[in-house]
Image: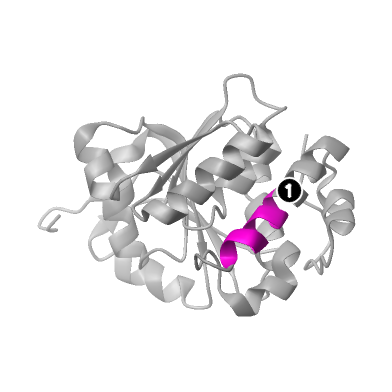
Amino acid sequence: MAIAPTYGKLDIKSAAEFARTFRVSHETVEKLELYEKLLMQWQKAVNLVAPKTIPQIWQRHFADSAQLVALAPGARTWVDLGSGGGFPGLAIAIMIANQKECACVHLVESNARKCAFLSEVARRTGAPARVHNMRIADAAAMGAVPVADVVTARALASLDALLELALPFFGNASTGLFLKGREAEVEIADAQKRWAFEVKSHASLSDSEGRILEIGKPMLRQGGEQ
């Protein structure tokens, strides 16, 4: 099982360091390296990640995504909203491929070129991922994406707006794992004006200023507008 390390912040500069830290198999690392290679190729034509983060790709993207796996060890159905270049959703799919029977990560992304990239990586790596080329609201309205064990998102929207987007994919036992930055506490306070929810704020292992917000099913407060 892939697990997060028990020591402080990470400083991962390579696939080998990633493998040692998260204790993943050689096969999994090879698939993540293929993902990295394809991303570098496609990045020339499609803006998949911020160019300035590429030199720290194993820290800023792969480790940032991988740390979520340990927070949901029993999850089989994941829904990743606004998947972009595939972080965290596609990286998670590769990591759990050999761990969970019938596991699937649903990647919801409206940009067709990014979806083409996600589909190519999923095909080449055999990751248990399904790519949905549509707006999040349309995916919810059409019932194209199932209720999830875990809903994930990174750099998508403020927490208040994110809860509104994510709500259709929450069941009573679902969990949201949302990667946030230095303003996480401010976003929580703002979202709680309109939503009632339980939240645990975890320190990010990959970003000294980052937080992982672990949230149960949100409920719109009386008088709140959706």
Residue 145: quarter of image: top left
Q: On the rendered structure, is 112 left or right of 125?
A: left
Residue 191 % position (x, y): 31, 65
What's the coloring here?
one colour
Residue 201 or residue 102, whichever sits in front: 102
Q: Residue at x 58, y 69 (%)?
A: 44
Residue 107: quarter of image: top left
Residue 10 or residue 224, whichever sits in front: 10
Label 1 SS: helix
Q: Amino acid at mark 1?
A: Leu
Report if residue 82 is visible in the image.
no
Residue 99 % position (x, y): 71, 27
Q: Residues within 10 Å of mark 1 (few under 14, many from 20)?
A: some
Q: Residue at x 66, y 54 (%)?
A: 38
Which span of residues is magenta-colored? 35-43
Q: On the rendered structure, is 79 left or right of 179?
A: left
Residue 212: quarter of image: bottom right
Up-down relation of residue 28 to residue 221 (above or below): above
Residue 200 % position (x, y): 52, 55
Q: On the rendered structure, is 81 left or right of 70?
A: left
Residue 140 or residue 53, whichever sits in front: 53
Q: Quadrant for the C terminus, please.
A: bottom left
- Is residue 5 inside the magenta stretch? no
Considering the whole magenta stretch, tell me its main secondary structure. Answer: helix
Residue 137 % position (x, y): 23, 48
Up-down relation of residue 198 to residue 188 (above or below): above
Q: How many callouts does the rendering have?
A: 1
Q: Which residue is mark 1?
A: 34
Q: Residue at x 38, y 40 (%)?
A: 132
Q: Quadrant for the N terminus, please.
A: top right
